[in-house]
Every structure is written in C-alpha cells, then in structure tokens.
Image (tube, helix red, strand yellow):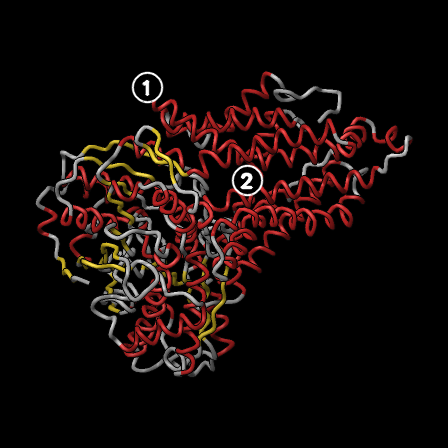
Amino acid sequence: MNFVTVLLATFDGIAYAALVFIVAVGLTLIFGVMRIVNVAHGSLYAIGAYLTASLTAAILAAGLPPYLGFPVMLVAAVVIGVVIGGPMEWLLLRRIYDKPEVLQLLVTFAVFMILEDVQRLVWGTQPYFQSAALQSLGMVQVFGVNYTVYQLIVLPLAAIVLLVGLRYFLRRTLVGKLILATTEDREAAQAIGINADRVFLLTFVVGAALAGLGGALAQPTTSVLPGIGADMIVLSFAVVATAGLGQIEGAAVAALLIGLGRSFAVYLWPEAAVLVPYIIMVLVLMVRPEGLFGSPAARKI
Amino acid sequence: MKHLLLASLVAAVPLTTYAQDKPAELKIGVATFLTGPASVFGVPARAAAEQIVEDMNADGGIGGVPVRLSFIDEGAGAEALTTEYRRLVETEKVDAMLAAISSGSCVTLAPLAEDLEVLNLMWDCGTQQIFEQDEYKYVFRTQANATPEMLATVAYLLKTRPDFKTLAVVNQDYAWGRDSWEIFSTALKAMKPDVEIVGEFFPKFGAADFSTEISRLQALQPDVILSTSWGGDLDTFVQQAAQRGLMNTSLFVLPLAESSLERLGSTLPAGHIVGARGDHYFLHPEFRDDPELKAFVEEFREKTGAYPIYSVFHMVQALAALEAAYDKAIEANGGAWPSEDQLVAAFEGLEFQGYGRPVTIREDNQGIEAQLLGTTVQGGEYPFATMENVMIFDGAGITTPIGEESVEWVGGLGPDFVESVKVDTFEN
C-alpha cells in the first residue's frame, strides 16, 4: 500500500464512519438516558430513508431544484422523531421502564417487526434510488479517483457538526443539563423538580430523529429496500457495544475505527471486509468487556 | 403418501371407473420471495402467476380444470419454508409445486419433493449442482442454470470485446456470487488464457455501500468489471459507480441487469453488457411484435406499473411447462385425466414455450433454454436503457452435457469454443 491508496482508503473509511456514527449516536443516546436498547432504531433509519426518497421525488416532480433535497432530509428526521418516536415512548416504552431488560428488548423488537411490515405496506418491495440531491453537488478528483462531494465533504461534516452540537447541547444548555442529571440519578433529579417523564420523551424523540437523519443522509448514496433497517441496527449496535453503551464521543471513535478498518480491509484483505467490524468488536470486548470508553458502574453519557 | 393418494382417489372416484375423473380444481403451490431483498423477483413473479392463471381459467383452465394457486414465502427462512411446503403437499394436497427462486431453497426442497413424491418445477433458481449430483424423478427445471448463463456471458464478452486484458469482479458474498464467479472465471481462463484478474471483491449480501470497492477499482482501472449481483445490491453498485465516473472508464458486464434496467432509468449509461438469465426480454428481437407477448406486457404493466423482468418470464415458462405436460399426458391417456405418474412421464423430452424460444426438458430433467444478452443503449422510446446488438445463444451447445460436472467441463473448453457456439445476432 502506498501513500495514495492509504489516503483513498481513509476517505472511504471516514465517509462510511460518518453515516454509521449518526445512526449509532441516536441508539447510544437513548440507551445512555433510558437504559433501553431500542431495536426499532433500525426501522426508524429505514423509514427516514424511504421518506426522504419519496419527498425528494415529489420535489423533483413539482419542478423544484434538486438541492431542496437537503432540507427535506431534516424534515424527514424531525417527522420520524415526532410522529413515530414521540408516540412510541409515550404509549409504549413509558410502561416498561421498570420491567426486565428481556421484556424491553422484546417490545422494541416487536415494534421493529411491525414497522418493517408498515414499510412494505407503504413503499412495497422494489428498491428506491433517488440521488438528485447528491448529484447536484458534483464530484471532486483526488489522485485520479473521483469522489462525490456529498460523500467526501458533506457526510463527514454532518457527523462533526452533530458530534459538536450534541456535546454543546448536553453540557451547555439547560435542557441538556436536565438530561444529564436525569441520567445520573433519576430519583434525585425528580426530587429537585425535574420532570423525568418529559426528559425521557425528549431524549427518545431526539434519538429517533437521529435514526431518521441517518437514513435520510444515507438515502442518496444507496438503494432503499426492505431489510436495510435490520442491517443498520446490527452494525450500529456493534459500534455502540465497541464504544461502551451510552458513550457519545466513544461512538464517534468506534465508528471511525470500524469504518477505517473496513475500508483498509477492502484494499488489503477484501475477503475479510465483511467481518472487520465484528472482529474489532470482539477484540475490544475481550480486552474491555464494558467497551472502549464504558465504565462498569457509573452511568454517563 | 402413495396410500394417502390412493385413499383420496378411492374416496373421490367410484371403483368401477378406470380412467381418473377430472378433479374439481388443479391446486398449484408456488414458493417465491414475498419478503426480503429477493422480493424484487418474487413479487412481480407472483403478480405474473396470478395474471396467467386468471387468463387460463377464463379459457377453462388446464385440460378443462380451473387452476388455484397458493403462495408460500421463501423469505421466511429454510425451516418455515419446508414446513409450509409440507403443509401444501400433505394437507392442501397440491397437484404440483413451483419452487423456488433461491438456489438455497431449491437445494433444500428438491430432495423433499422427491420424498413427498410431488411434482416440483424449479422455476427460477440458478444452481447447476442439483441435477449434476443426483437423479430426480419428480423434480424438473423449466429454465437454464448458472452454467449456460455464465458461458453465454463469457461468449458475448469475447465476441464483442476480444481484446481486453484485465478484469475485476464485484459479486455478492453468498452462494450465487461465489458459484457464478467460479464458472465465469474458469470459462474465461479456458477460452482466453492471457486475461489477468486484477481484483476480486465479495461485498456483503445486501451491502448498502460500495464506495471503497469503487475507489479501489478506479485506482486499478480494469478493462472489464463483472458483477452478477441483482436487486438493490446491483442498483446501488451501478448508481455509485456511475456517480463517480467508473462506468466511463471500464466496461461493465452485468448478467442479471435486465431485471434492473427500468429501476436504473437513465443512470445506466450506454455501452455496457447486460444479460437476462435466459432467452426472454419484453423487447425480445424475435417476439416483440408477437401480439401475445405485447398483450402480456401491457396487461402486466397495467397491473403492476412495471415492465416484466426475467423472473416473470421464468414464471410464465413454468406454467407453460405445466400446461404442456398436462396436455401431453391427457393426450397420451386417450383424453382422460392423467395420474401423477403419467404426468411426470410427460415431462420427459417435453417441449414448451413461454415468451422466448421453445424450451425442452432433457433426460436429466434440466431445461435447455437459449440465452439472451445485449449492450445497453439510452435515448430510445423508454425512459431507461434498452438492449442493442442482442445475441441469442442456442441452449444446447452451452449447457453442461449429461453426466459431466459443470466447472470441470467448462475448464476443458478451449479458445475455439467461442467460435463454435451457435448464435444469432440482432442489431437492436
């Protein structure tokens, strides 16, 4: 491998890591605050992608310019968070916080299954591909290899903005501090007057919107079809477990590790590219069972 | 099963009758993908089956008996599929099964059909191994298999671009991706020993991102890039490759892309090689003006909103085979309804026709089907790529001879094989 191929592999790894991070960070945020592994996160990702594809197609059909596909992604994410995430927490999860983990897992898995069928009902089984927004940004050439601007610049930028924004939100804003306090000790937080129910609802809506945003951002680069949700939940769970459950910065590092590992594998050992994320996860968990940044006892996000 | 059948016959038929009475209806079970990524094939094929049977029944059905279809989902997993298959055969008492799309399903179900002694038509699965490894009485394949499909692809490539030097492959990481590459690469090396394989990539089945593979391919600059992928994987790969200009520098060979042409729209540029897993295409150069094909395509479009793809034509072929076999068996039986054994016997040497050239069933139960490939062209009367420079390869010369093992046989072919293949060329 020479310098150029190392650089190329790095670009691909970062673009991939950015997408995985955006989805995984929602999963880890929800877990950090609510102690629930939300399997339905994968469905929210898929529906975010479907919704973006349909809305973008509608925009183009109306004769509007393709760059409007970008605001549409945010719209899709908010819709997912509020319309699906909100009721899901309020009607369902709220009832099972003090139930055993197995039951919580089964409930979110059930929601996942239901939403998978809803997707099939609404969007059918044929793949959707809608890349007008991506193509409106054009390409850049690096050492004779073409990259889309979207992949090389927009996706990593979106991930960085999200990471910094989320840090700022949690550490510097009042609502963020309320979330952190509730995460640290729910009863003590309630004792000083924090409305824990509202904090949980808000966290879940934000987490769900992040899943939708991940899907929306992934949509221009890939076919949207049944099954993408399941793939994504497995991969983002690998990221979250590698990072340590509930670790936001950790998720960024783990996503980068897995993204780079995978893209370097395509150059050096293509046969193993599929395995790399899981090999990394297993190696990390063998040495640190609580994940790279997890701490066995304390609850932190 | 035999005594069960006998018992039901005794119940249904007065003992004095020698020939069997016509049943009230003909029950056919169909295994197809209704869920999962392969539903891109399974769902259109189900629509086709329903459409054909509706038309058949409007004409009185098969041999005057109306046909009723039951569908089971291959996407539910092997265990659920075999349970459902048994249920259809043993409880619903279907007269014939059409199974399946996935080679994995066929490998599981073919021996089961033999055990249950039920007629099973393998209507879409590609693996060449089933009839090469075992002899079957009740299992038939109503289309070609991976070997002629890949051989025709190699032949088309060598006929149209004889001078390429390097090739890379990007196949899905599962049985079909691996097996088709084994046949393709063995055949290619046998017929063009100087070709250099510069990259072999097997991304995960259902992969959503091929960026890294595409970067690497751009650095490698192979003359030809082969991908036997299909469905969402193929769409994503082609879209990402086209977005990044890879399709302007390398020739893409996509043996299953006929099924993606409409979805890919204007993205798939002109000048790349696509195949159809057999001799069928809604613009088939020999039959596109045939009123029957035209009417079928129109009706299918009205019902589903899409043009028919190869899995649809495979379904047409399987039902055509079944109808032809019943007709042949009824005739052989002096006009009376045939027994199951008589029906199975009718499949030997059976000739039938879907919307391509006629297909014949060989002694080893394998269908001999011609293969159609072409080069993409954009800007016709459709908003997606169609094929020009279409070649139709005669099936007999490119199907593994009985008793031979495909990879071994293909490896023994020489560079002169390409010239010896029987082929018809159509400009558009």
Please indicate, yes or no, whether residue B10 appears anywhere in the rendered image: yes
Which of the two residues, B25 or A180, is positioned nearer the viewer here?
A180
Residue B164 falls left or right of residue B386:
left
Q: Give the residue pinned by disc 2.
A: A232
Q: Which residue is drawn at 48% across and 58% down?
A: A60
The subunit carrying tag 2 is A
Instruction: Give percent across and percent down for residue B246.
Output: 30, 40
Disc 1 from disc 2: Cα separation? 32 Å
Helix, strand or loop for disc 1: loop
Residue type at mark 1: give it. Asn
- The image quadrant that residue A188 belongs to is top right
Question: Whole-percent x and y of residue B144?
Answer: 27, 56
Which amino acid type corresponds to the residue marked 2 in the rendered image? Met
Is B116 located above or below residue A69 in the figure? below
- Residue B53: numbered disc: none
Q: Mark 1 lies on which chain?
A: A
Q: Who's the residue at 37% across and 54% down the image?
A: B264
Reading the image, the residue beneath label 1 is A2
Question: Measuring 14% from the left and 60% from the top, which residue is drawn there?
Answer: B425
Would you say A111 lies left or right of B397 here?
right
Q: Is residue B305 above or below residue B60?
A: above
The residue lying toward the viewer, choosing from B339 and B420, is B420
Quarter of the picture containing the C terminus of chain B is bottom left
**Mark closer to the chain start, 1 or 2:** 1
Q: Disc 2 on helix, strand or loop?
A: helix
Could you tell whether A109 is left or right of A73 in the image?
right
Residue B112, position as x, y percentages in the image? 43, 53
